[in-house]
Image (cartoon, coloured by chain):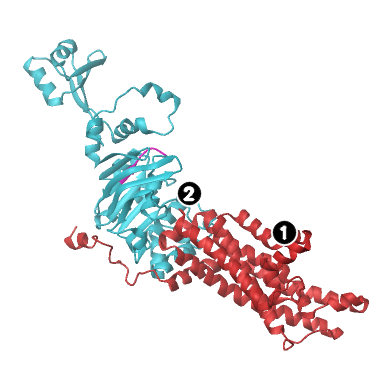
Chain colours: A red, B cyan
């Protein structure tokens, strides 16, 4: 062994392979490789697209076919935009589950220990995961929300009950529906990282979005009306539907949902940074 | 180089690693030995920054691993065979890891070929055998061409050919001036690979010595003497620090004298020797001897051995 070899070991080493260094951008590239190389994530994303567009079209088509028989109160509460986007109520579950899986899957398989050994400044991994997820799911879910809107409206237009994308709030709501799904997915990812377990993560997500809201509705309205609008699902509906269950403005609803996502991510980040992997 | 100082890890009331201090030097293969449950994996996870020590510190190449700018150039790890997402192919698994540190893509195919996984690189790792999983783990450890390498039980699940390959690989890496730290609960494996040994039991350091010194420290060498005049010779040899037993007629087992001394005594008294052989304790026996009291889960049958003392225990930490 030469002296040069020995000296190199004093503090840190010069990489034998040129240009080696961890950067946030490189970790993002790595997370993109991870995302695209799992068939399950690609399939789950396709399921979400199918539910958003397919279910929206199905319901729009059925409503249009039965419009002649609709009762006056049904006609009064009808919103063409909400009808065409009704698939998102279910599609959000697929996106949320995808979010959970992206982190809980790493813990359940042991992959996380490879990931965090390669990138010991751990939060870079979390930020990269969120970035890739937000980018990919954002593009896909905003595009499919627009797809659902235009397909739904074309089906409803036969009865002259469709709305145009230029009608008041339409653009914001369709765009907001896509953003809503991204935020649900980020909350799912945070739950996956916080609980490190797929089943627990999905259960909590379902409880948060599908169980707690209807249960709250059973409580006296004095309580339900005060708390209800601040639940993540209801806060979301304030900016992407005409739902009447909330008194929050679109902007306030968006802020509340972002606060939920930020709190969940902060908790997940704290656990990832502090706890043993 | 790996410098472990006063390293302690507690899980609630249970102490997994207790005040370990040792240094792993570059240029040689250092074996990390201990019975199952001794704290080897926990120690290695702390070296890699996955688990935070309750107290104490670990430096990899002179600094905490978490501060490394190019972590994969500093430290390559195989901590468990399948720290891999089972639905991803071996190639994509390694590519994703390589990308974080800016390791070129060509290096990914190089390490895949090096470990002999070329034909299955595009297959899901979930279908890999334990041996293939180990090879993949070794590939990921080598990905960044690291200065320091830690491998936890790398030969588990490998066939004899694979074991030989790992042995030569580790020696080769050490010869290039790298620090190589390999854990095993199998002494026999380490005796053929490691030049230095760190032995722990129940989370505590038992020995930090050269391989040869370890055997000498932990064992009393026995000299077997075959002679038709066993009784006469025995009477001549026996003394304060010398014990002699006779397992069969014409055969003596002498503790406390070396072969030269016994041969000289026999020569001086004109006694015939038909055989004079030193029986060195193997590394395996030395290991068993030293860790006997520290094995976490004793089988019932070892109860009778509990009274046996640790030979040379005074010299061992």
Res. A25 visible in picture? yes
Residue A121: x %, y % from top left: 41, 63
Res. B161 visible in picture? no
Decide: few, some or many residues near mark 2? Use Cα within 10 Å; few <14, some 14-19, many ≥20: some
Using residue A22 as the reference point, say whether residue B83 is left or right of it: right
Using residue A34 as the reference point, say whether residue B260 is left or right of it: left
Q: Is residue B212 above or below residue A251?
A: above
| Residue shown at 19% from the left, 57% from the top | A1
Q: Chain of mark 2?
A: B
Decide: few, some or many residues near mark 1? Use Cα within 10 Å; few <14, some 14-19, many ≥20: few
Question: Does residue B34 belong to the magenta stretch?
Answer: yes
Q: Are marks 2 and 1 in contact (CB under 8 Å)?
A: no
Q: Is residue A245 above or below residue A199?
A: below
User: Of residues B63 and B133, which is closer to you in this image?
Assistant: B63
Determine the image quadrant of residue B235.
top left
Residue annotated with mark 1: A211
| Residue shown at 66% from the left, 73% from the top | A253
Tag 1 secondary structure: helix
Q: How far separated are the C-alphas under marks 2 and 1? A: 42 Å
Q: Chain of mark 1?
A: A
User: Of residues A241 and B176, which is closer to you in this image?
Assistant: A241
Using residue B201 as the reference point, say whether residue A141 is left or right of it: right
Residue annotated with mark 2: B130
Residue B228: x %, y % from top left: 18, 13
Determine the image quadrant of residue B101.
bottom left
Same chain shared by disc 2 and disc 1: no
Question: Does residue B43 belong to the magenta stretch?
Answer: no
Residue B185: x %, y % from top left: 38, 40
| Residues shaded magenta | B31-36
Tag 2 secondary structure: helix
Which disc is residue B198 wearing?
A: none
């Amino acid at each position: 062994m030469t002296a040069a070899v020995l000296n190199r070991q004093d503090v840190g080493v010069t990489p034998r392979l040129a240009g080696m260094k961890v950067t946030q951008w490189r970790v993002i590239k790595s997370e993109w490789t991870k995302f695209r190389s799992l068939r399950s994530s690609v399939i789950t994303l396709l399921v979400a697209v199918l539910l958003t567009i397919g279910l929206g079209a199905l319901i729009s088509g059925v409503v249009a076919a039965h419009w002649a028989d609709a009762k006056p109160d049904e006609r009064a509460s009808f919103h063409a935009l909400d009808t065409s986007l009704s698939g998102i109520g279910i599609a959000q579950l697929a996106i949320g589950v995808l979010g959970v899986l992206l982190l809980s899957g790493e813990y359940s398989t042991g992959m996380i220990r490879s990931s965090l050994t390669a990138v010991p400044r751990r939060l870079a991994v979390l930020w990269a995961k969120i970035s890739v997820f937000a980018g990919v799911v954002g593009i896909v879910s905003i595009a499919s929300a627009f797809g659902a809107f235009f397909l739904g409206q074309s089906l409803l237009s036969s009865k002259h009950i469709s709305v145009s994308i230029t009608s008041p709030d339409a653009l914001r709501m369709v765009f907001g529906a896509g953003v809503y799904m991204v935020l649900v997915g980020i909350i799912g990812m945070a739950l996956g990282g916080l609980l490190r377990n797929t089943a627990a993560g999905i259960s909590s997500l379902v409880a948060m979005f599908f169980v707690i809201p209807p249960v709250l509705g059973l409580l006296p309205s004095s309580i339900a009306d005060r708390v209800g609008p601040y639940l993540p699902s209801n806060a979301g509906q304030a900016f992407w539907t005409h739902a009447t269950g909330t008194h929050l403005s679109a902007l306030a609803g968006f802020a509340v949902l972002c606060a939920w996502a930020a709190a969940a991510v902060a908790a997940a980040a704290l656990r990832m940074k502090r706890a043993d992997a | 180089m790996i410098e472990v100082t006063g390293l302690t890890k507690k899980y609630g009331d249970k102490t997994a690693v207790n005040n370990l201090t040792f240094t792993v030097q570059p240029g040689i293969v250092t074996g990390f030995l201990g019975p199952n449950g001794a704290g080897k994996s926990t120690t290695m996870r702390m070296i890699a920054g996955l688990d935070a020590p309750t107290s104490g510190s670990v430096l990899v190449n002179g600094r905490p691993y978490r501060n490394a700018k190019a972590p994969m150039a500093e430290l390559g790890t195989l901590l468990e065979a399948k720290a891999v997402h089972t639905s991803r192919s071996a190639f994509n698994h390694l590519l994703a890891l390589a990308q974080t540190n800016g390791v070129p893509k060509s290096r990914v195919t190089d390490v895949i070929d090096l470990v002999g996984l070329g034909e299955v690189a595009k297959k899901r790792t979930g279908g890999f055998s334990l041996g293939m999983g180990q090879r993949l783990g070794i590939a990921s450890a080598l990905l960044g061409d690291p200065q320091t390498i830690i491998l936890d039980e790398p030969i588990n699940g490998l066939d004899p050919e694979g074991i030989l390959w790992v042995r030569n690989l580790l020696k080769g890496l050490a010869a290039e001036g790298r620090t190589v730290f390999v854990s095993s609960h199998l002494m026999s494996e380490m005796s053929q690979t490691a030049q230095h040994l760190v032995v722990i039991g129940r989370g505590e350091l038992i020995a930090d010595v050269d391989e040869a010194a370890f055997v000498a420290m932990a064992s009393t060498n026995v000299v077997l003497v075959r002679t038709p005049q066993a009784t006469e010779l025995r009477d001549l040899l026996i003394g304060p620090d010398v014990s002699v037993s006779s397992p069969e007629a014409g055969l003596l087992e002498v503790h406390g004298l070396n072969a030269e001394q016994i041969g000289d005594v026999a020569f001086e008294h004109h006694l015939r020797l038909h055989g004079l052989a030193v029986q060195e304790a193997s590394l395996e026996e030395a290991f068993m001897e030293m860790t006997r009291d520290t094995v976490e889960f004793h089988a019932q049958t070892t109860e009778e051995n509990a009274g046996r003392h640790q030979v040379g225990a005074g010299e061992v930490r």
